[in-house]
Amino acid sequence: LNVGRGIELMIDTMALLPEWQLWIAGGGDIESELQQRAEQSTAKGRIKFWGRIPLEDLSRITCQARIGFSLEEDLGLNYRYAAPNKIFDCIQHRIPVIVSNLPEMASIVSHTQTGIVLKARHPQALAQCVLLMNRDVDTYSYFVNNCEKAAKDLCWEKESLRLLEMYEESNQK
């Protein structure tokens, strides 16, 4: 729960989504500020902070989600070109995602059609994305089915082969 992860935006958006809950896992530099923000929100009873979750328990929590979020802000090259693990975790759990309009995240989600790229960073836009994704059973199923397909390619078993190829290429130079 650090600066630039878009968690403030998620908390603020909850006021516009009265039928939804927001679960926040992890800890970090701004955890207490985020908890205060949630406590002051009209949605405070629907925002749950799980704290740090052991890796072996994270899957149990993740599979209960309907949507995953990766809303990093463009605060430098590290964020701009990030491909956060949580995107891949969601896809592996067949959870559609809403991501920032940053190059790598947008590319992954656009290419695989596993979610929606957030174009404008304000609560109304994020709420629209959530509602669009869940407009009807067919729309949501479309994203879930694409997660199923993408999960077969976006996995360590395949990515490790690409990594080994890159190592071999660099050693040949």
Image: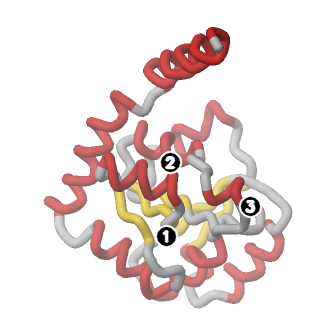
Q: Is 138 on the left-hand or right-hand side of 19?
A: left
The correct choice, above or below, for 150 with respect to 103 in the image is above
Mark 2 vs mark 3, foreground winner is 2
Disc 1 or 3, which lies upstream in sequence? Answer: 3
Of label 2 and label 3, which has the lower sequence position? 3
- Residue neighbourhood size for the residue with mark 2, other residues' Cα within 10 Å, grouped as few (<14), some (14–19), many (≥20): many
Depth check, mark 1 against mark 2: the one in front is 2
User: Which residue was labeled with disc 3?
Assistant: 1
Q: Amino acid at mark 2?
A: Ile
Q: Is residue 121 above or below residue 139?
A: below
Residue in the image at 48% along x and 62% along y: 99
| Residue carrying label 2 | 87
Q: Which of pointers 1 and 2 lies earlier in the amino acid sequence? A: 1
- Whole-angstrom CA distance, mark 1 to mark 2, is 19 Å
Q: Characterize the local packing of mark 3: few (<14), some (14-19) or many (20 or more) Cα atoms within 10 angstroms.
A: many
Q: Amino acid at mark 3?
A: Leu
What is the CA distance from the residue labelled 1 to the residue labelled 3?
Answer: 18 Å
Residue 168 placement (x, y as % from top left): 59, 11
Image quadrant occupied by the C terminus: top right
* Residue hosting label 1: 21
Total numbered badges shown on the rendered structure: 3
The one nearer the camera, 1 or 160, is: 160
Horizontal relation, residue 34 to residue 140: left or right: right
**Residue 124: image location, x then y, percent:** 44, 87
Q: Amino acid at mark 1?
A: Gln
